[in-house]
Amino acid sequence: MPIQVVMSDTGSSAELKLTEATRLALEPNQVRIRTRASAINYLDLMIRQGELPESAMPTLPHVLGVEGSGVVTETGSSVTQLKSGDRVIWMGHIGTGGYAEEVCVDSRYICPVPDSVDLIQAGAIPVNATTAWHMLVNLAQVKVGQTVLIHGGSGGVGSLAIQLAKHLGLTVITTASAKKLDFCRTLGAELALDYRSDDLVNEILSFTDGIGVQVSLNSVAGESLVSDMSVLADHGTVIIYGFLGGPPTQNLSELLVPYFNKSVGIRVSDIYTYYNSQPEAFRADLQHLIGLLAEGTIAAQIHEQFPLSEAARAHELMELGSVKGKLMLVSEEA
Protein backbone atom coordinates (compact mmCIF):
# COMPACT_ATOMS: atom_id res chain seq x y z
CA MET A 1 0.00 0.00 0.00
CA PRO A 2 1.22 3.55 -0.69
CA ILE A 3 2.02 5.75 2.31
CA GLN A 4 0.99 9.31 3.09
CA VAL A 5 1.50 12.00 5.73
CA VAL A 6 -1.71 12.80 7.59
CA MET A 7 -2.57 15.62 10.00
CA SER A 8 -5.44 14.70 12.31
CA ASP A 9 -5.48 18.03 14.14
CA THR A 10 -4.00 21.50 13.82
CA GLY A 11 -0.94 22.43 15.83
CA SER A 12 2.77 21.74 15.76
CA SER A 13 4.70 19.67 13.25
CA ALA A 14 4.17 16.68 15.54
CA GLU A 15 0.66 16.48 14.07
CA LEU A 16 2.17 15.13 10.81
CA LYS A 17 2.04 11.33 10.96
CA LEU A 18 3.10 8.74 8.38
CA THR A 19 0.33 6.22 7.64
CA GLU A 20 -0.79 3.78 4.97
CA ALA A 21 -3.09 5.36 2.39
CA THR A 22 -6.44 4.06 1.22
CA ARG A 23 -6.30 3.81 -2.55
CA LEU A 24 -8.71 6.36 -4.03
CA ALA A 25 -11.09 5.53 -6.87
CA LEU A 26 -10.08 7.30 -10.07
CA GLU A 27 -12.65 9.73 -11.48
CA PRO A 28 -13.13 9.93 -15.29
CA ASN A 29 -11.21 13.24 -15.59
CA GLN A 30 -8.39 12.27 -13.24
CA VAL A 31 -4.93 10.77 -13.57
CA ARG A 32 -3.24 8.57 -10.98
CA ILE A 33 0.40 9.54 -10.41
CA ARG A 34 3.16 7.74 -8.58
CA THR A 35 4.85 10.60 -6.75
CA ARG A 36 8.48 11.51 -7.27
CA ALA A 37 8.45 14.86 -5.44
CA SER A 38 5.99 17.07 -3.58
CA ALA A 39 6.76 20.67 -2.70
CA ILE A 40 6.21 22.25 0.70
CA ASN A 41 4.52 25.64 0.64
CA TYR A 42 3.70 28.24 3.30
CA LEU A 43 0.08 27.35 2.61
CA ASP A 44 0.82 23.92 4.10
CA LEU A 45 2.17 25.50 7.28
CA MET A 46 -0.84 27.80 7.57
CA ILE A 47 -3.21 24.85 7.25
CA ARG A 48 -1.26 22.77 9.76
CA GLN A 49 -1.23 25.67 12.22
CA GLY A 50 -4.93 26.39 11.68
CA GLU A 51 -4.25 29.91 10.45
CA LEU A 52 -6.49 29.96 7.39
CA PRO A 53 -9.98 31.49 7.74
CA GLU A 54 -12.37 28.87 9.10
CA SER A 55 -14.24 28.75 5.77
CA ALA A 56 -11.00 27.86 3.94
CA MET A 57 -9.73 25.22 6.35
CA PRO A 58 -10.01 21.64 5.06
CA THR A 59 -11.85 18.90 6.91
CA LEU A 60 -9.64 16.82 9.20
CA PRO A 61 -7.93 14.42 8.92
CA HIS A 62 -6.13 16.02 6.00
CA VAL A 63 -3.19 15.26 3.70
CA LEU A 64 -1.24 18.41 2.80
CA GLY A 65 0.39 19.16 -0.55
CA VAL A 66 -0.91 20.97 -3.65
CA GLU A 67 1.87 20.44 -6.21
CA GLY A 68 4.40 17.89 -7.29
CA SER A 69 5.77 15.58 -9.95
CA GLY A 70 5.78 11.90 -10.79
CA VAL A 71 4.89 9.23 -13.33
CA VAL A 72 1.39 8.44 -14.57
CA THR A 73 0.22 4.94 -13.61
CA GLU A 74 -3.45 5.12 -14.64
CA THR A 75 -5.78 7.47 -16.52
CA GLY A 76 -9.50 8.08 -16.13
CA SER A 77 -11.94 7.11 -18.86
CA SER A 78 -12.26 10.65 -20.27
CA VAL A 79 -8.51 11.45 -20.31
CA THR A 80 -6.98 11.37 -23.79
CA GLN A 81 -3.89 13.62 -23.64
CA LEU A 82 -1.94 11.58 -21.08
CA LYS A 83 -0.98 7.91 -20.77
CA SER A 84 0.61 5.50 -18.33
CA GLY A 85 4.37 6.05 -18.10
CA ASP A 86 4.28 9.80 -18.81
CA ARG A 87 6.53 11.95 -16.63
CA VAL A 88 4.42 14.87 -15.37
CA ILE A 89 4.05 17.80 -13.02
CA TRP A 90 0.77 18.87 -11.48
CA MET A 91 -0.95 21.44 -9.32
CA GLY A 92 -4.09 20.71 -7.34
CA HIS A 93 -6.61 22.30 -5.01
CA ILE A 94 -6.38 22.07 -1.22
CA GLY A 95 -7.14 18.45 -0.44
CA THR A 96 -5.35 16.92 -3.42
CA GLY A 97 -2.96 15.33 -0.93
CA GLY A 98 0.53 15.68 -2.35
CA TYR A 99 2.32 14.44 0.78
CA ALA A 100 1.85 10.87 -0.43
CA GLU A 101 3.41 8.22 -2.63
CA GLU A 102 0.35 8.29 -4.89
CA VAL A 103 -2.02 11.08 -5.87
CA CYS A 104 -5.08 11.49 -8.13
CA VAL A 105 -5.19 14.81 -10.00
CA ASP A 106 -7.57 16.57 -12.40
CA SER A 107 -5.98 16.11 -15.85
CA ARG A 108 -6.53 19.78 -16.74
CA TYR A 109 -3.75 20.71 -14.33
CA ILE A 110 -1.15 18.17 -15.40
CA CYS A 111 1.66 18.79 -17.89
CA PRO A 112 4.21 16.38 -19.43
CA VAL A 113 7.86 16.82 -18.48
CA PRO A 114 10.68 16.22 -21.00
CA ASP A 115 13.06 13.37 -20.22
CA SER A 116 15.88 15.91 -19.96
CA VAL A 117 14.28 17.60 -16.94
CA ASP A 118 14.81 16.29 -13.42
CA LEU A 119 11.45 15.46 -11.83
CA ILE A 120 12.45 16.88 -8.46
CA GLN A 121 13.32 20.21 -10.10
CA ALA A 122 10.09 20.09 -12.08
CA GLY A 123 7.98 19.34 -9.02
CA ALA A 124 9.15 22.56 -7.39
CA ILE A 125 7.75 24.98 -9.98
CA PRO A 126 3.95 24.64 -10.48
CA VAL A 127 2.73 26.94 -7.69
CA ASN A 128 5.66 29.36 -7.47
CA ALA A 129 6.47 29.77 -11.16
CA THR A 130 2.87 30.18 -12.27
CA THR A 131 2.27 32.66 -9.44
CA ALA A 132 5.24 34.77 -10.54
CA TRP A 133 4.48 34.49 -14.26
CA HIS A 134 0.79 35.30 -13.80
CA MET A 135 1.58 38.46 -11.84
CA LEU A 136 4.32 39.71 -14.15
CA VAL A 137 2.79 38.81 -17.51
CA ASN A 138 -0.98 38.46 -17.16
CA LEU A 139 -1.69 41.05 -14.48
CA ALA A 140 1.11 43.64 -14.66
CA GLN A 141 1.75 43.14 -18.41
CA VAL A 142 5.36 44.20 -17.89
CA LYS A 143 7.45 45.65 -20.68
CA VAL A 144 11.14 45.32 -21.45
CA GLY A 145 13.17 47.94 -19.60
CA GLN A 146 10.78 48.38 -16.68
CA THR A 147 11.83 47.95 -13.06
CA VAL A 148 10.16 45.53 -10.66
CA LEU A 149 10.42 45.33 -6.88
CA ILE A 150 10.20 41.75 -5.60
CA HIS A 151 9.74 41.32 -1.87
CA GLY A 152 11.10 38.11 -0.39
CA GLY A 153 13.43 37.40 -3.27
CA SER A 154 14.94 34.36 -1.56
CA GLY A 155 11.64 32.50 -1.21
CA GLY A 156 9.97 30.04 -3.55
CA VAL A 157 7.99 32.62 -5.53
CA GLY A 158 10.58 35.36 -5.15
CA SER A 159 13.51 33.30 -6.44
CA LEU A 160 11.59 32.31 -9.56
CA ALA A 161 10.15 35.81 -9.99
CA ILE A 162 13.69 37.23 -10.14
CA GLN A 163 14.68 34.76 -12.84
CA LEU A 164 11.50 35.30 -14.85
CA ALA A 165 11.82 39.07 -14.55
CA LYS A 166 15.33 38.90 -16.01
CA HIS A 167 14.05 36.65 -18.80
CA LEU A 168 11.41 39.29 -19.55
CA GLY A 169 14.00 42.07 -19.77
CA LEU A 170 13.28 43.79 -16.47
CA THR A 171 15.55 45.44 -13.93
CA VAL A 172 15.10 43.73 -10.56
CA ILE A 173 15.15 45.20 -7.07
CA THR A 174 14.52 42.73 -4.27
CA THR A 175 14.28 42.59 -0.49
CA ALA A 176 15.38 39.79 1.82
CA SER A 177 17.17 39.28 5.12
CA ALA A 178 20.86 40.21 5.20
CA LYS A 179 22.12 36.62 4.97
CA LYS A 180 20.11 35.99 1.80
CA LEU A 181 21.06 39.06 -0.24
CA ASP A 182 23.98 37.43 -2.05
CA PHE A 183 21.69 34.54 -2.99
CA CYS A 184 19.27 37.03 -4.59
CA ARG A 185 22.10 38.69 -6.49
CA THR A 186 23.23 35.37 -7.94
CA LEU A 187 19.70 34.94 -9.35
CA GLY A 188 19.97 38.25 -11.19
CA ALA A 189 18.81 41.02 -8.86
CA GLU A 190 20.60 44.28 -9.64
CA LEU A 191 19.77 45.75 -6.22
CA ALA A 192 19.22 43.55 -3.13
CA LEU A 193 18.17 45.31 0.08
CA ASP A 194 17.95 44.16 3.69
CA TYR A 195 14.34 44.74 4.60
CA ARG A 196 15.25 45.00 8.29
CA SER A 197 17.91 47.72 8.16
CA ASP A 198 18.13 49.40 4.77
CA ASP A 199 16.27 52.62 3.99
CA LEU A 200 14.18 51.00 1.28
CA VAL A 201 12.46 54.11 -0.05
CA ASN A 202 15.61 56.23 -0.42
CA GLU A 203 17.68 53.33 -1.76
CA ILE A 204 15.09 52.46 -4.40
CA LEU A 205 14.44 56.04 -5.48
CA SER A 206 18.18 56.69 -5.71
CA PHE A 207 18.73 53.53 -7.76
CA THR A 208 15.92 54.47 -10.19
CA ASP A 209 16.94 58.15 -10.45
CA GLY A 210 13.76 59.18 -8.65
CA ILE A 211 11.43 57.43 -11.10
CA GLY A 212 10.49 54.47 -8.92
CA VAL A 213 9.33 51.00 -9.91
CA GLN A 214 6.58 50.08 -12.34
CA VAL A 215 5.54 46.98 -10.37
CA SER A 216 5.92 45.69 -6.83
CA LEU A 217 5.26 42.01 -6.12
CA ASN A 218 4.38 42.10 -2.44
CA SER A 219 4.09 38.91 -0.37
CA VAL A 220 4.46 40.82 2.90
CA ALA A 221 1.75 43.55 3.03
CA GLY A 222 1.45 44.87 6.59
CA GLU A 223 3.48 48.08 6.89
CA SER A 224 5.32 47.36 3.62
CA LEU A 225 2.46 48.83 1.63
CA VAL A 226 3.38 52.34 2.82
CA SER A 227 6.91 52.16 1.42
CA ASP A 228 5.69 50.46 -1.75
CA MET A 229 3.38 53.36 -2.52
CA SER A 230 6.27 55.76 -1.99
CA VAL A 231 8.42 54.07 -4.64
CA LEU A 232 5.82 53.46 -7.36
CA ALA A 233 6.44 55.17 -10.68
CA ASP A 234 3.59 56.88 -12.52
CA HIS A 235 0.96 54.27 -13.45
CA GLY A 236 2.73 51.77 -11.18
CA THR A 237 0.99 48.86 -9.48
CA VAL A 238 1.44 46.98 -6.23
CA ILE A 239 0.32 43.37 -6.51
CA ILE A 240 -0.27 41.80 -3.10
CA TYR A 241 -0.12 38.01 -3.11
CA GLY A 242 0.55 37.22 0.55
CA PHE A 243 0.41 38.52 4.09
CA LEU A 244 3.55 37.19 5.78
CA GLY A 245 3.67 40.40 7.80
CA GLY A 246 -0.08 40.47 8.39
CA PRO A 247 -2.85 42.30 6.52
CA PRO A 248 -2.34 45.96 5.57
CA THR A 249 -2.62 48.17 8.63
CA GLN A 250 -3.61 51.32 6.74
CA ASN A 251 -6.91 52.65 5.51
CA LEU A 252 -6.46 52.09 1.77
CA SER A 253 -8.37 55.19 0.72
CA GLU A 254 -6.09 57.34 2.89
CA LEU A 255 -3.09 55.51 1.48
CA LEU A 256 -4.10 56.09 -2.14
CA VAL A 257 -5.23 59.73 -2.00
CA PRO A 258 -1.70 61.26 -1.77
CA TYR A 259 -0.75 59.39 -4.95
CA PHE A 260 -3.87 60.19 -6.94
CA ASN A 261 -1.92 62.34 -9.41
CA LYS A 262 0.39 59.38 -10.19
CA SER A 263 -2.44 57.09 -11.31
CA VAL A 264 -1.11 54.17 -9.28
CA GLY A 265 -2.98 51.08 -8.22
CA ILE A 266 -3.17 48.27 -5.68
CA ARG A 267 -4.48 44.85 -6.58
CA VAL A 268 -4.42 41.39 -5.05
CA SER A 269 -3.57 38.09 -6.68
CA ASP A 270 -4.50 34.58 -5.58
CA ILE A 271 -3.22 31.98 -8.06
CA TYR A 272 -6.29 29.84 -7.41
CA THR A 273 -8.51 32.48 -8.99
CA TYR A 274 -6.63 31.94 -12.25
CA TYR A 275 -6.46 28.18 -11.66
CA ASN A 276 -10.23 27.88 -11.19
CA SER A 277 -11.50 30.38 -13.75
CA GLN A 278 -9.12 29.77 -16.68
CA PRO A 279 -7.79 26.19 -16.50
CA GLU A 280 -6.72 26.06 -20.15
CA ALA A 281 -4.74 29.30 -19.90
CA PHE A 282 -3.27 28.17 -16.59
CA ARG A 283 -2.10 24.89 -18.10
CA ALA A 284 -0.64 26.68 -21.14
CA ASP A 285 1.38 28.94 -18.84
CA LEU A 286 2.59 25.95 -16.84
CA GLN A 287 3.63 24.15 -20.02
CA HIS A 288 5.52 27.26 -21.16
CA LEU A 289 7.32 27.39 -17.82
CA ILE A 290 8.39 23.76 -18.17
CA GLY A 291 9.96 24.80 -21.47
CA LEU A 292 11.89 27.57 -19.71
CA LEU A 293 13.03 25.05 -17.12
CA ALA A 294 14.12 22.60 -19.81
CA GLU A 295 16.21 25.21 -21.65
CA GLY A 296 17.85 26.43 -18.43
CA THR A 297 16.25 29.89 -18.38
CA ILE A 298 14.88 29.23 -14.91
CA ALA A 299 15.83 26.76 -12.20
CA ALA A 300 14.02 25.86 -9.02
CA GLN A 301 16.18 26.71 -6.03
CA ILE A 302 15.86 23.61 -3.86
CA HIS A 303 17.19 24.20 -0.35
CA GLU A 304 16.85 20.61 0.87
CA GLN A 305 15.07 17.32 0.16
CA PHE A 306 13.38 15.08 2.72
CA PRO A 307 11.73 11.66 2.58
CA LEU A 308 8.00 11.60 3.40
CA SER A 309 8.84 10.19 6.82
CA GLU A 310 10.60 13.48 7.69
CA ALA A 311 7.81 15.87 6.70
CA ALA A 312 7.63 17.18 10.27
CA ARG A 313 11.35 18.03 10.25
CA ALA A 314 10.93 19.84 6.94
CA HIS A 315 8.11 21.95 8.41
CA GLU A 316 10.29 22.79 11.40
CA LEU A 317 13.09 23.96 9.11
CA MET A 318 10.73 26.19 7.13
CA GLU A 319 9.46 27.76 10.36
CA LEU A 320 13.02 28.84 11.24
CA GLY A 321 12.98 31.29 8.32
CA SER A 322 16.38 30.24 6.98
CA VAL A 323 15.20 28.45 3.83
CA LYS A 324 16.30 29.79 0.45
CA GLY A 325 14.00 28.56 -2.29
CA LYS A 326 12.03 25.34 -1.80
CA LEU A 327 11.86 22.33 0.47
CA MET A 328 10.85 19.08 -1.22
CA LEU A 329 9.43 15.76 -0.03
CA VAL A 330 10.88 13.06 -2.24
CA SER A 331 9.78 9.48 -2.90
CA GLU A 332 11.80 6.74 -4.57
CA GLU A 333 12.01 6.74 -8.37
CA ALA A 334 8.69 5.71 -9.85
Image (spheres, grey):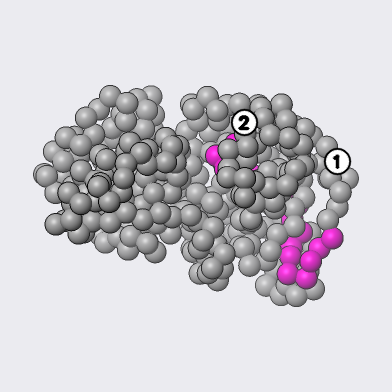
Q: Position of residue 219 (x, y in %)?
A: 41, 43
- Which badge, 2 or 1, comes first in the chain's sequence? 1
Q: Is residue 1 visible?
A: yes
Question: Which residue appears at 32% of the width and 38% of the height?
Answer: 224
Question: Which residue appears at 42% of the width and 35% of the height?
Answer: 245
> Viewed as shown, does residue 306 lie left or right of 198?
right
Q: Position of residue 280 (x, y in %)?
A: 55, 71
Q: Quadrant of residue 110?
A: bottom right
Q: Amino acid at mark 1?
A: Glu
Q: Quadrant of residue 54?
A: top right
Calculate the distance from the C-alpha at mark 2 to the C-alpha at mark 1.
21 Å
Residue 20: numbered disc: 1
Residue 59: numbered disc: none
Q: Secondary structure at mark 1?
A: strand
- Please name whichever residue, 280 or 266, is drawn nearer the observer in this view of the structure: 266
Look at the image and give the residue range highlighted in magenta.
Answer: 25-45
Residue 315: numbered disc: 2
Residue 42 drawn in magenta: yes
Residue 334 drawn in magenta: no
